[in-house]
Image (tube, rainbow, N blue to C red):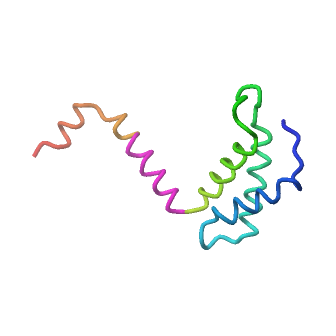
Amino acid sequence: MLEIDFVAYQPLVNKVVRINTPSGVDRSDAISIANLALLRASELFDPIAHPNCKFDTYAISAMKYELWKLVPENHAQFDEALHSSLTTTLTTPADEEEKYTP
């Protein structure tokens, strides 16, 4: 686990929240979620495995992802994409012939 000073990262958290918070989401809730994403990023970041990636870039990506998940439309898009990919993966050619024959 990477040891970080959360107070030093608050300006970064505030900037990411200000730019990426969806409308209708309370700012204090978004800051809490971004701080949790920062904590999780500090647990998962491995500088040895990825020497060309800075922690700031990794943390920003984690915060943006968590804020993106707040939007209900994104859940629907994800579920639809997952369903279509599973459907195409699990559908056999025989199933397609039976499905589309008049």
User: In this rendering, is residue 31 above or below 102?
Assistant: below
Q: How many marks?
A: 0
**Residue at the image position 18 percent from the left and 38 percent from the top:** 98
Q: Residue furthest front?
A: 52
Spot occupied by residue 67 in the image (x, y as percentages of width and height): 64, 58
User: Magenta part of the protein: which range?
Assistant: 72-85
| In-image side of 85 versus 22 (left or right) | left
| Percent position of residue 70, x then y | 61, 61
95 is higher (above) or lower (below) than 75:
above
Between 53 and 83, which is closer to the camera in this rendering?
Answer: 53
Residue drawn 73% across the image and 66% down it: 29
75 inside magenta stretch: yes
In this rendering, is residue 60 above or below 28?
above
Q: Could you tell me residue 60's position as x and y percent?
A: 69, 50
Quarter where residue 45 is shown: top right
The secondary structure that most of the magenta stretch takes on is helix
Residue ID at (34%, 38%)? 88
Q: Quadrant of the N terminus?
A: top right
Residue reaching furthest top? 49
x and y percent of residue 56 in the render? 75, 45
In this rendering, position of residue 23 left or right of residue 47: left
Q: Quadrant of residue 2?
A: top right
Quarter residue 27 falls in = bottom right
**Residue 43 counted in the magenta span:** no
Residue occupying image coordinates x 80% and y 47%: 39
